Image (tube, rainbow, N blue to C red):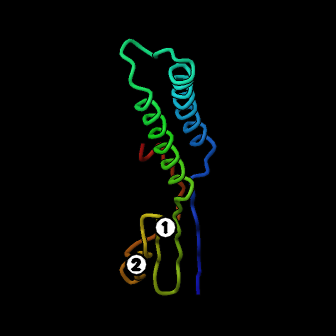
């Protein structure tokens, strides 16, 4: 029987604002460069890369940003306390839950903390 269950996810608005503030200008700049060089035929910069390389860079950046943002979106910490153990799983990194028997826990207490203030 589960006595306590909690799920935590990365749903803080400030985090998604930071992602947007970093991702959108970079993707927009690369998209502008593709339009400028590939569509309009005007090289970008003093030493422009080839059209193929520019499209490859754009695809790589877009893929990397999508993967990182997706990872933060699906990441989830699951904690459950039963009569015998504490189960912790941080998806997608833990394929199986980590079980800690209650008899191995020496001390536990509830407290409020500031993640940024205490851990940086």
For disc 2, the neighbor class at 10 Å (few under 14, some 14 to 19, many from 20) is some
**How far apart, in angstroms, are the residues tagged by discs 1 and 2?**
16 Å
- At horizontal 51% and vertical 29% (from top left) the residue drawn is 26
Q: Position of residue 75 (x, y in %)?
A: 52, 59
- Residue placed most toward the observer, 99 or 22: 22
- At horizontal 39% and vertical 84% (from top left) the residue drawn is 103
Q: Position of residue 6 (x, y in %)?
A: 58, 68
- At horizontal 52% and vertical 26% (from top left) the residue drawn is 34
Q: Looking at the image, is 22 positioned above or below residue 44?
A: below
- As helix, strand or loop, the secondary structure at mark 2 comes to strand
Q: Which residue sits furthest top?
A: 46
Q: Mark on residue 100? A: 2
Quadrant of the frame with the C terminus: top left
Quadrant position of residue 1: bottom right
- Residue placed most toward the observer, 11 or 6: 11
- As helix, strand or loop, the secondary structure at mark 1 comes to loop
Q: Mark on residue 68? A: none
Q: Mark on residue 109? A: 1
């Amino acid at each position: 029987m589960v006595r306590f269950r909690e799920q935590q996810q990365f749903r803080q608005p400030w985090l998604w604002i930071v992602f947007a503030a970093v991702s959108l200008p970079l993707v927009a700049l690369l998209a502008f460069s593709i339009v400028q060089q590939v569509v309009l035929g005007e090289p970008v910069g003093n030493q422009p890369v080839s059209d193929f390389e520019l499209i490859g860079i754009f695809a790589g950046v877009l893929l990397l940003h999508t993967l990182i943002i997706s990872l933060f979106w699906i990441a989830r910490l699951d904690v459950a306390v039963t009569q015998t153990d504490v189960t912790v799983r941080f998806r997608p990194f833990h394929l199986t839950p980590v079980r800690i028997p209650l008899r191995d826990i020496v001390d536990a207490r509830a407290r409020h903390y500031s993640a940024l203030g205490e851990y940086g």
